[in-house]
Image: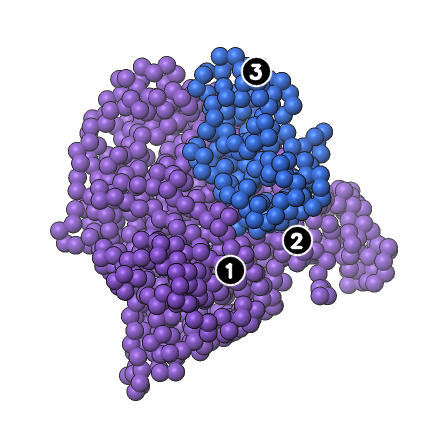
Amino acid sequence: MATPFKYVGRSYPAPDAASKVSGTLVYGTDLRLPGMLYAQLVLSPHAHAKVGSIDKKAALAVPGVVGIYSHHNAPSTAYCRYRIMPGQAGCIDDETLFASTARFFGDRIAAVVASSLEAAREAARLIEVNYTELAPVLSAEAALEPTAARVHPGGNLVHEFEYAAGEPAELPAGAVRTSTTVHTQMLHHAAIEPHTCLANFDSAHKLTIWSPCQSVYGARIVVADLLGLPYNRVRVIKVPMGGSFGGKQEFILEPVTAFLALQTGRPVSLTLDREECIRSTMVRPEQCSVVRSAVRADGELIELDIETLLAAGAYAGSSPDYAEAMAQKLTRLYRVGRYRHRGRVAYTNAPVAGGMRGWGAPDIATCMEVHMDQIARQLGLDPLDLRLRNLVHPGDIDPLTRRSVGEARVRQCLERGAEAFGWRERAAMPPGLGRIRKAVGLASGAHKNGMLSNDFPEISTMTLKMNEDGSLDLNASIHEVGAGSLVMLKTIIAEELDVAPEMISAREADSETSPYDFGCFGSRMTYVCGAGALALSQMLRGRLIEAAAELLEISPEALEAVNGRVQRVEAAGTGLSYPEIVQGARMRHARDLIVTHTYQGTSNPGSYCVQFAEVEVDVLTGLVRVNEMLTAVDIGRAINKAMVEGQCHGAIQAGIGSALLEEVALDADGRAGTGGFKNYHLVNAADMPPVTVLLVEHEGDDGPYGAKSVGEIATVPTAGAIVNAVNRVLGTAITTLPLTPERIVAALGEAAATRGRDASCC
Amino acid sequence: MLLNTVVNGTAVSLDVVPDARLIDVLRNALGMTGTKEGCAEGECGACTVVIDGAAVNACLVFAAQVQGKSVLTVEGLSSAGQLNALQKKFIENGAVQCGFCTPGILMSATALLARNPKPSQEEIRRALAGNLCRCTGYAAIIKAVAAAADEGRPT
């Protein structure tokens, strides 16, 4: 297909791909500094306990031990691990470096610092902590009982809210009311690189932190505020990251590692093992939502009324914002006359909940899409038709925010996806009566593009300079998570300045040297930072043309920038090359080809995805196999085709895991039985189904060349599509995730939804 | 104890404690940090190396177990600064995202292609079943291994 682009829309490898395949890229876990010490944490073995005396005698006798820290000899200043700005609304300072009350199985009780990892581990084993066990509160529902033990002194209700739009109306004749209760589980982010951090307080009294984080400025604020240091004495450097999926978005290891470096005056490295990552970092929240709707007989949604109860775990972190984010997805997806979403967030003695890929959108989409299939069954409608009747149209106004959903092409995703998947024919096939039965399911989902809301701005500052040889340096606070942000930005700059992408270098975030940016999250990299890079490139192009005009002594209007030169319009080979302009402008006119720009985002359209799944279920064992998936994504424009497709495949792999396999489960005492990948199963290569990716491309939104976000939206509908397919196979109404064989067999046996405990959470 | 082994074609002789894991000797004593640790229990495969032709989790073997054997790590795939065909196919096919699982997957694929130069899709999937990747959904990786096999000179 003809494309107006020279570089945009092609496929480029991940950044540093050559150093990744040769094993030479230095990740956080590979960093070593002279005189570096190793830290080992002591984690609470109890879900809820008072921390009494700590006997360090035997531990201190281990050769190589430099120091042991706990709440007895560390500041008790409370902080919020999620903060990215001073004074940020929604941040609750309730966490300390070391707990004086252990609030979950995995809470930080102490840390040993030693000259070797072996010594640190040995000493950590020898520390004797005197605990007084307290009754744990293990579910959000239990936490809100009046008699529940308090996780924090102020009570267990962290946050509650209500969003509403439209007025309740009298229901027309034939309208149907439906209610579905859906429970989603705690998930481990499962980046293959464990959490790691290195910190050093040097002789110039500057604290440097090397972290595979998603916001150097956020880490700087949290650490500097906690330790009482001026912001310019804390330098945070983003190092190569072996995956995050949101698990490294919040500042979990940075505060404690920085504190240990400050105390010892030596570089300190802290790397968790897998069990510690699962237990003590953060999880996707466990939540339960009741979705109630009123629908006309023809399927038109009249009302949606949703109640969400979300477990924050031991510390509030991002849970208040996360729960509110869940409430702001569905009015971008469906037209509905009356929408109300009430939410409550409760402390529990469980692992700390936090943002994960999709940030509430997969959770609420699963609830809504399972509910939509229930409506379809009740009304005898094809699930496809029910969605077509209700999905938003381009230019619709989201009634909650009164902002446009933009060029929303979710209907096109549904129609083109259904056609390519053969939905009508396959949906008409009976699942069969044998032991192995199969059926198809679908689900849709909406997400966002950046963090712009009615009370939060979107900005990103970047600097672009051209060197004497025409090569370019982009300086921006970019946090590459592996998804190709740096390549995306280089591609845009290459397109705008008409230079080869190899001519552009772009480095990652360093709070001391790179300009301000919030961080790499919120589906904002392409839509916001990409648009910023485009504006910046256009400004530099203007400066190149002006400088060339001055050198050539002709009007800038007569010039254009093409193929690495500024030339007379449509006169190839005339004018000056970029190197000639840079050198000439500097020597003759004291001009430098460097531009800094603060881009301001002014829109936040919806991103959309519709997915189709075929599953087969063994009704004897309850095992589910996903045979095939199709994902149709409203991408706007794929800047880097291969990476966009890679995001789509990986998103489905994670979504299948969340539907069928993955769960951080607690026992009756609140201990995580999930000690590692041996019992936290990810979908592997053998079980991954074939996936077809359909990209719906168009212009009209403010992203570069129309581009919108992909990494998060692409995982939003997956679990819903699979749950719907399984329920269509079996004629069941399973609404508790994951759909383990036990739950499936139980549902078949009882034709009841799920086990008692799970279904009763709301 | 004195360990005598061959790593990436070079004879290595060094003193190790008897219970040292191979992964620690590679990463710490030899400074070869391309071999990654993701779980320490043989589930994720990030530490996969090839020992006498077989793909093995370096977190599950003692260094002492490679006495007199030949170990190939990701650092041994390139020669004279040139990437081999398998590495190139990984780059060309978009099989690399965050890259943390990549070394282990390359080593499992190397062992597969050495014993089965023309594997089917299913055989590739099975050979990589012990390597977890959270980024790619495996499709591009499987394509890259198949492309390297098609080229005939994978390693």
The quadrant holding residue A220 is top left
Q: Chain of mark 2?
A: A
Could you tell me how far apart the alpha carbons at marks 1 and 2 are, in whole angstroms? 25 Å
Shown in blue, the chain is B
Would you name the residue on which mark 3 appears? B4
Would you name the residue on which mark 1 appears? A628
- At horizontal 56% and vertical 60% (from top left) the residue drawn is A692
Residue closer to the observer: A107 or A605 = A107
Q: Label 1's element?
A: strand
> Residue A616: x percent and y percent?
44, 60
Would you name the residue on which mark 2 appears? A11
Q: Nearer the viewer, mark 3 or mark 2?
A: 3
Mark 1 belongs to which amino acid? Glu
- At horizontal 29% and vertical 37% (from top left) the residue drawn is A107
Q: Chain of mark 1?
A: A
Q: Residue furthest left?
A: A147
Residue A607 visible: no
Q: Label 2's element?
A: loop
> Residue A146: x percent and y percent?
14, 54
- At horizontal 26% and vertical 34% (from top left) the residue drawn is A45
Please determine whether, in this image, residue A19 is positioned above or below residue A761: above
